[in-house]
């Protein structure tokens, strides 16, 4: 089957899955960032969706999302980030160490990330799923076993991009669900605010920002 047809089939399946899920409930809007929650079918921890519009190319947004070394510049409470496998923005694995307040242990995330573009709508999807077994665990940090961190980038007119972010994560340990749900109202908004600042900066949005596998509108 041609690659284009496979991508379209996967996208149709993704959209169908989203429609089957419980509807999102709007919670708040802060500095143009809209936040939604919904109940998870398999956890007391809520799932989060947040949207915002950035002045950016699609390629620049993908570069920020995949530049793990600079996660501490924008990802909330991230102490360290690095790519541990792969050398392309299309497919790679990365490590993220998140600072948790005392007396809790810091959490480490390992994600396997795939990025692809709908050839018809030009929407870009960056889908990251926890891959906790890629590195040996240590006693210093708690390895997160279950997590999804996904981006959907939709091109708009006037070189704007609508960013839709989805997060589903269980930090593990003895942290009560209500505390995790409370943190969901803070961390992602701060992350996306800094994401917007970074993606609109010349570092990523300059003349050399184009990626070969991304087609701009």
Image: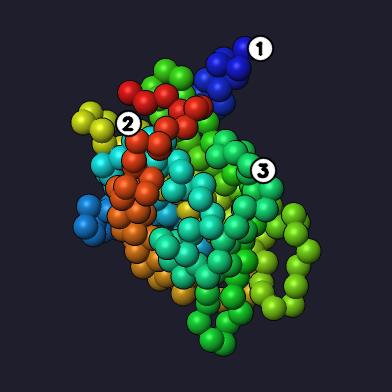
Q: Residues within 10 Å of mark 2 (few under 14, many from 20)?
A: many
Label 2 vs 1, first from the N-terminus: 1
Q: Secondary structure at mark 1?
A: loop
Q: Which residue is mark 2?
A: 155
Mark 1 surroundings within 10 Å by alpha-carbon count, few (fewer than 14), some (14 through 19), many (20 or more): few
- Image coords of residue 120 (percent x, y): 42, 18
For marks 2 and 3, give the one nearer the viewer. Answer: 3
Q: Is residue 148 left or right of residue 1?
A: left
Q: Residue furthest top?
A: 1
- Image quadrant where residue 61 sits: top left
The structure residue drawn at horizontal position 34% and vertical position 40%, both measured from the top left corner, is: 206
Image point (51%, 27%), residue name: 213
Mark 3 is surrounded, within 10 Å at the Cα level, by few (under 14), some (14 to 19) or many (20 or more) other residues, namely few
Furthest residue toward bottom: 103
Left or right, 2 with reference to 30: right
- Residue pointed to by mark 1: 1
For the residue pair 20 and 135, the one nearer the viewer reads as 135
Residue 12 visible in the displayed image = yes
Q: CA distance from mark 2 to mark 3?
A: 27 Å
Q: Tell me if label 3 and label 1 are in contact, CB under 8 Å.
A: no
Q: CA distance from mark 2 to mark 1?
A: 27 Å
Q: Residue at x 67, y 43 (%)?
A: 86
Q: How many numbered discs sit on the rendered protein?
A: 3
How is the protein colored in the picture? rainbow
Q: Nearer the viewer, mark 3 or mark 1?
A: 3
Confirm or deny contact between disc 2 and disc 3 (CB under 8 A).
Answer: no
Residue 188 percent coordinates (x, y): 39, 60
Mark 2 lies on a secondary structure that is strand
The answer to whether residue 35 is seen in the rendering is no
């Amino acid at each position: 089957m041609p690659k284009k047809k496979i991508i379209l089939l996967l996208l149709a399946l993704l959209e169908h899955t989203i429609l089957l899920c419980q509807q999102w409930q709007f919670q708040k809007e802060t500095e143009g960032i809209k936040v939604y929650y919904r109940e998870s079918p398999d956890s007391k921890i809520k799932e989060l969706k947040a949207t915002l519009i950035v002045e950016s190319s699609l390629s620049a947004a993908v570069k920020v999302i995949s530049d793990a070394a600079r996660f501490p510049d924008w990802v909330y409470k991230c102490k360290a980030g690095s790519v541990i496998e792969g050398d392309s923005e299309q497919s790679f694995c990365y490590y993220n160490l998140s600072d948790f307040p005392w007396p809790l242990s810091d959490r480490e995330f390992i994600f396997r990330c795939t990025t692809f573009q709908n050839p018809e709508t030009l929407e870009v999807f960056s889908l990251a799923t926890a891959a906790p077994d890629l590195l040996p665990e240590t006693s210093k940090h708690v390895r997160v076993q279950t997590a999804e961190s996904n981006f959907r980038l939709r091109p708009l007119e006037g070189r704007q991009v609508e960013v839709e972010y989805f997060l589903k994560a269980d930090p593990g340990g003895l942290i009560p669900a209500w505390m995790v749900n409370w943190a969901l109202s803070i961390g992602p908004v701060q992350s996306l605010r800094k994401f917007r600042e970074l993606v609109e900066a010349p570092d990523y949005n300059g003349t050399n920002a184009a990626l070969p596998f991304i087609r701009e509108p």
